[in-house]
């Protein structure tokens, strides 16, 4: 009975964390709220994994939201713009001359892999470290490539989460990005 109560309490806490994420995304008018809210989710989950006592989830979440607001927005939108440039280049590769098309596909795949690793570890780096803004890019890449096994495990976990979402899309409405942050 005690184990089932812990599991239900954990599921409820993950649901409440998702609700806090949604509320703070709206609080930041979506554009300015999505990245600090995501950083706050990672920070709260870090506290939970370190078994820190959380008295009020909303207070802790709001505190991390305001603490990481500037850095998370700068880095999030910078990475978003770079991701858009990579996607745009990928879409225009078929229009390039055939002589450089294969080279361009290789470059785009290389940049996409580096960008994917940087996205995976951007918010954990923002939460764990207190660097100047430009150092987080290098820090997230160092964190991602420091353990190849950890990176592969991270990719497998995200693939399992995406497959689960494709099979049961309603899960996203209850838990949102919180399971990704646990990965």
Image (cartoon, rainbow, N blue to C red):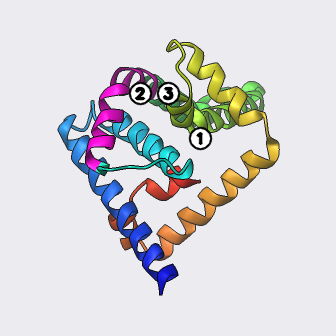
- Pointer 3 residue: 79
- Pointer 2 residue: 72
Of callouts 2 and 3, the N-terminal one: 2
Q: How far apart are marks 2 and 3 (CA)?
A: 10 Å
- Looking at the image, which residue is at 48% across and 68% down? 165
Where does the image place residue 101, in percent across and percent down from the top left? 72, 31
* Secondary structure category for the residue under label 3: helix
Q: How crowded is mark 2: few (under 14 residues within 10 Å), some or many (20 or more)?
A: many
Where does the image place residue 128, in percent across and percent down from the top left? 55, 31
Q: Work out which quarter of the rendered image holds the C terminus and state it.
A: bottom right
Q: Residues within 10 Å of mark 3 (few under 14, many from 20)?
A: some
Of callouts 3 and 1, the N-terminal one: 3
Q: How far apart are marks 2 and 1 (CA)?
A: 14 Å
* Horizontal arrangement in the rendering, residue 117 relative to residue 16 (left or right): right
- Pointer 1 residue: 120
Where does the image place residue 119, in percent across and percent down from the top left? 56, 36
Residue found at the far right of this picture:
148
């Amino acid at each position: 009975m005690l184990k089932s109560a812990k599991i239900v309490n954990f599921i409820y806490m993950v649901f409440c964390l998702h609700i806090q994420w949604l509320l703070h995304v709206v609080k930041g008018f979506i554009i300015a709220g999505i990245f600090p809210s995501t950083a706050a989710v990672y920070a709260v989950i870090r506290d939970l994994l370190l078994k820190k006592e959380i008295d009020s989830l909303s207070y802790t979440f709001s505190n991390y939201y305001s603490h990481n607001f500037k850095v998370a927005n700068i880095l999030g939108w910078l990475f978003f713009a770079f991701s858009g440039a990579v996607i745009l280049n990928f879409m225009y590769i078929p229009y390039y001359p055939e002589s450089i098309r294969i080279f361009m596909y290789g470059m785009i795949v290389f940049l996409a892999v580096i960008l994917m690793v940087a996205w995976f570890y951007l918010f954990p780096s923002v939460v764990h470290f207190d660097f100047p803004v430009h150092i987080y890019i290098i820090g997230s890449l160092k964190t991602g490539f420091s353990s190849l096994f950890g990176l592969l495990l991270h990719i497998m976990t995200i693939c399992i989460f995406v497959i689960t979402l494709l099979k049961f899309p309603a899960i996203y409405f209850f838990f949102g990005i919180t399971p990704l942050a646990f990965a």
